[in-house]
Image (tube, rainbow, N blue to C red):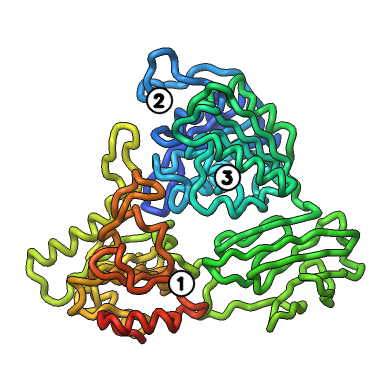
């Protein structure tokens, strides 16, 4: 007689807890806080809140904060991190990325946030139209940056005493269809209250649904008021994502951020701000204004003001443009005139995943490669390895407040780089063709190379797409030579300057003495003025 065994699926407990996802940036398990409602029912669709922590904090503390739970009297953050207090149940799933610690929310940390979002969506039943983003201080800045670069993901934003990264302000029009609620203390000594005041004023002028609460006499701890009594969930409950707004305003400098709602940028100049203002003025009638945009596509299927069987009337920059009809329509500018037609990026052109700038080569999976070529002495070989090691040392201890950045990239000798590394990772290559065999291998494809005789006095640093990934070449002096604090001053010296670079830089003695820098042309060649300046230095060979 056989005995039937009934398998019971394993389920997570309800309430606050910590999960991990596997990051392909550095092959590590990365944690994030998670709140799962009581009686979670996988047959239901749940709203999701992504909560971003501030500087000096972590995923466990931020999960407490968003539920309005501050530290107990006299309790330090270290002590509060060790446990989760009880709080009132809400019918939301909440995820709080660790995002590597205190490093802002661009680059690797930004990727972590998006990876956490993907991981939660793969595990749980999420309502795609009720996904919300909030954060405090550094996390409030991250809320603005990630919210405005991906505006069509979110239903609403809730930034608290935000410290946005440089360049976020030019993305303000992207919030047109996103309700935003700012909170700030008027005595904030860490992030000036003017930040939230100015953002609120700017968004109101753009017609955004923006709210602002300012707390008199409150310092940087305005989150204690903003998240009190789980108020953020009540506010979020008022909003659902508008998948098909009548008007889309969208600004971007990068193909990485090229889509908003029913608008996609097909051709831009990376590094130059491209803008679009596209609005339905009636059924099947569109009025569009652009700047610095070469081509775009509209995906109109599902929009209540669009009927595929009816003619589409489109005006671009004041002139009517004939269309071929259909649910997806594309437009390209040629010699100052817009015409219907899809723009096709050529293999040699800058495009998504191959656009730079230099920081892009450090924002996803990458390894640091030092050279062993040229029969170096033992001391010279150690020096080469030490430079690569310094560059890869993200996780140095800064102080008790800032802690460490938990990124652990690999350091590899050129002779030990495997085909799987080339296939899967961006490569940061140190040296010249004489000292690094991989640089030598790619030598005939490189637009500029540092002469070996100049390696002691000059630094050449640039990014280039290669083998479906990036290579970043640092020849001669290290790219952080002479780096000064700025932007995020708590970053290690080797990372400090990354976000300030464009596609290439040639300098002498330190990065403060620039011979030439800038963006490569659309076909990844050096601009004429850069060729002239670089050649005049006598330090490089230009292809």
Q: Quadrant of residue 457?
A: bottom left
Numbered badge on residue 519: 1
With respect to residue 168, does 157 lie above or below? above
- The image quadrant where one finds the C terminus is bottom left
Residue 456 screen position, x and y as percent: 17, 71
Q: Secondary structure at mark 3?
A: helix
Seen as rendered, the residue at the extreme top is 73
Q: Is residue 202 left or right of residue 284?
A: left
Disc with the residue nearer the chain's start (2 vs 1): 2
With respect to residue 72, does 199 lie above or below? below
Q: Is residue 5 left or right of residue 102?
A: right
Please give the name of the residue rendered at 60% of the width and 47% of the height, measured from the top-left corner: 147
> How many other residues sit within 10 Å of disc 1, few (<14), some (14-19) or many (≥20)?
many
> How many other residues sit within 10 Å of disc 2, few (<14), some (14-19) or many (≥20)?
some
Residue placed most toward the observer, 497 or 397: 497
Disc with the residue nearer the chain's start (3 vs 2): 2
Q: Quote the CA–CA distance across marks 2 and 1.
A: 44 Å
Q: Secondary structure at mark 1?
A: loop
Q: Is residue 372 left or right of residue 29?
A: left
Disc with the residue nearer the chain's start (3 vs 1): 3
How many labels sit on residues? 3
- The image quadrant where one finds the N terminus is top right
Q: Which residue is mark 2?
A: 81
**Taking the image as drawn, is residue 477 in sight?**
yes
Q: Is residue 493 left or right of residue 122?
A: left
Residue 480 screen position, x and y as percent: 28, 59
Residue 158 screen position, x and y as percent: 61, 36
Q: Quote the CA–CA distance across marks 3 and 2.
A: 26 Å
Residue 190 screen position, x and y as percent: 44, 34
User: Marks 2 and 1: which is nearer the front?
Assistant: 1
Q: Which residue is mark 3?
A: 144
């Amino acid at each position: 007689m056989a005995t039937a065994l009934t398998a019971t699926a394993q389920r997570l407990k309800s309430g606050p807890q910590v999960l991990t996802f596997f990051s392909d940036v550095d092959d590590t398990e990365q944690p994030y806080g998670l709140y799962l409602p009581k009686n979670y029912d996988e047959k239901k669709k749940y709203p999701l809140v992504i909560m971003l922590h501030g500087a000096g904090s972590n995923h466990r503390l931020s999960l407490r904060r968003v539920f309005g739970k501050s530290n107990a009297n006299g309790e330090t953050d270290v002590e509060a991190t060790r446990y989760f207090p009880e709080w009132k149940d809400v019918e939301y799933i909440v995820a709080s990325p660790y995002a590597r610690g205190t490093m802002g929310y661009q680059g690797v940390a930004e990727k972590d946030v998006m990876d956490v979002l993907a991981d939660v969506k793969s595990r749980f039943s999420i309502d795609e139209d009720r996904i919300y983003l909030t954060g405090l201080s550094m996390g409030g800045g991250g809320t603005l940056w990630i919210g405005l670069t991906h505006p069509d993901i979110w239903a609403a934003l809730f930034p608290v005493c935000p410290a946005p990264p440089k360049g976020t302000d030019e993305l303000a029009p992207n919030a047109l269809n996103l309700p935003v609620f700012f909170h700030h203390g008027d005595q904030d000594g860490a992030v000036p209250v003017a930040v939230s005041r100015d953002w609120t004023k700017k968004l109101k002028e753009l017609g955004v649904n923006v709210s602002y609460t300012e707390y008199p006499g409150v310092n940087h701890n305005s989150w204690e008021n903003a998240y009190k009594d789980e108020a953020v969930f009540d506010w979020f409950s008022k909003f659902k994502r508008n998948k098909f707004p009548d008007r889309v305003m969208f600004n971007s400098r990068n193909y990485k951020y090229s889509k908003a709602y029913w608008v996609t940028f097909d051709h831009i100049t990376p590094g130059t701000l491209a803008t679009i203002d596209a609005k339905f003025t009636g059924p099947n009638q569109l009025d569009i204004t652009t700047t610095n945009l070469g081509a775009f596509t509209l995906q109109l299927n599902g929009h209540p003001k669009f009927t595929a069987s009816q003619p589409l009337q489109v005006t671009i920059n004041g002139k009517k443009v004939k269309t071929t009809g259909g649910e997806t329509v594309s437009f390209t500018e040629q010699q100052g005139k817009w015409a219907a037609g899809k723009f096709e990026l050529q293999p040699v052109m800058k495009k998504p995943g191959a656009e730079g700038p230099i920081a892009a080569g450090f924002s996803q999976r990458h390894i640091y490669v030092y050279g062993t070529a040229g029969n170096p002495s033992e001391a010279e070989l150690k020096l080469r390895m030490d430079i690569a090691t310094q560059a890869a040392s993200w996780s140095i201890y800064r102080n008790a407040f800032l802690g460490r950045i938990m990124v652990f990239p690999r350091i590899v000798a050129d002779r030990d780089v495997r085909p799987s590394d080339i296939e899967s990772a961006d490569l940061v290559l140190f040296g010249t063709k004489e000292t690094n065999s991989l640089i030598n291998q790619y030598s005939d494809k490189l637009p500029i190379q540092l002469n070996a005789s100049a390696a002691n006095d000059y630094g050449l640093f640039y990014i280039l797409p290669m083998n479906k990934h990036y290579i970043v070449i640092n020849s001669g002096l290290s790219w952080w030579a002479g780096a000064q604090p700025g932007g995020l001053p708590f970053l290690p010296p080797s990372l400090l300057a990354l976000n300030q670079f464009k596609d290439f830089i040639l300098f002498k003695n330190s990065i403060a003495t620039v011979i030439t820098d800038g963006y490569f042309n659309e076909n990844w060649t050096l601009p004429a003025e850069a060729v002239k300046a670089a050649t005049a230095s006598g330090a490089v060979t230009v292809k």
